[in-house]
Amino acid sequence: MLPAERKRRILDYVRRHNTASISTLAKEFRVHEATIRRDLSEIEQEGSLKRTHGGVVIEAWTNDEPSFNERSNQNLDQKMRIGRKAASLVEDGDHIIIDSGTTTLHIARNLVHRSNITVVTNDINVAAELRDAPKVKVILTGGELYPSSYMLNGMLTDHALKSLHVIKAFIGTPALHPQHGLMHPEAQLVPAKQGMIRAAREIIVVTDDRKIGKLSLHTVAPNSEIHTLITGEEAAEEDLKPFRDGGITVYTV
């Protein structure tokens, strides 16, 4: 059997079974385990499968994002830890962007007592958290309100971001892939995130461990544009290694 045909059949096999070990695939296709490892490495580079310790699984896809209320209590403790760590990276005098999201909201909650910080956000909840922070200036981007997430988005949001320059941008995401980067299922939300990234000197992605390795329809930015990743200690080191190897500073909290 030619290598290309074997790889196609391996992919079909894993799609039927969701997961498979190297030894199982070697027996199924009557080749050495070293051959299977080589095949799996090539398939993984194409983004179709994800290697695990001793085997392989089908890549997980994110096709939509639940409402804010649904997401707000998911992995809450982890999001709180991520928020505290992210806030600790903010220095007095910084101008920062805080993206909309249930994880980024916890960054704002940890900035209430800070001094001389300017926060740009497209999130009504983030702005509300900082309303009683006397030494934090808040700038809302404006835009169309998305009631399910309290997010501002659209042409006005994109226009505002084009005129801004900040030190750090804290970006949330429903999917972060080791090959394809920061991803999102909804095309209309991509331009604002890209505008935040263009406006900032340093890009810090904040996301819980369930989003690591996920695929989605649209690439927001390649991993080469990310400087720092903050996630929970629940994240597997094998999932984080590609990001570390790519030069991204990774914090697990």
Image: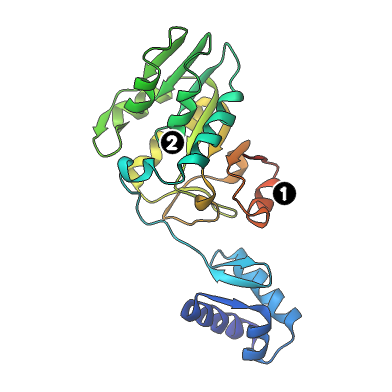
Give whichever of discs 2 and 1 has the lower sequence position. 2
Which residue is labeled 2 in the image? 193
Between 81 and 39, the residue placed more toward the observer is 81
- In-image side of 67 versus 17 (left or right): left
Would you identify the image quadrant in which residue 249 lies?
top right
Which residue is labeled 1 in the image? 245
In the image, what residue occupies the spot 59% across and 38% down? 230
In the image, what residue occupies the spot 55% across and 35% down? 81
- In-image side of 228 versus 67 (left or right): right
Q: Which mark is residue 146?
A: none
Would you identify the image quadrant in which residue 146 lies?
top left
Q: Relative to 73, does residue 49 appear above or below in the rendering? A: below
Label 1 sits on a secondary structure element that is helix
Between 225 and 245, the residue placed more toward the observer is 245
Could you tell me which quadrant the C terminus lies in? top right
Q: Relative to 17, does residue 252 appear above or below in the rendering? A: above
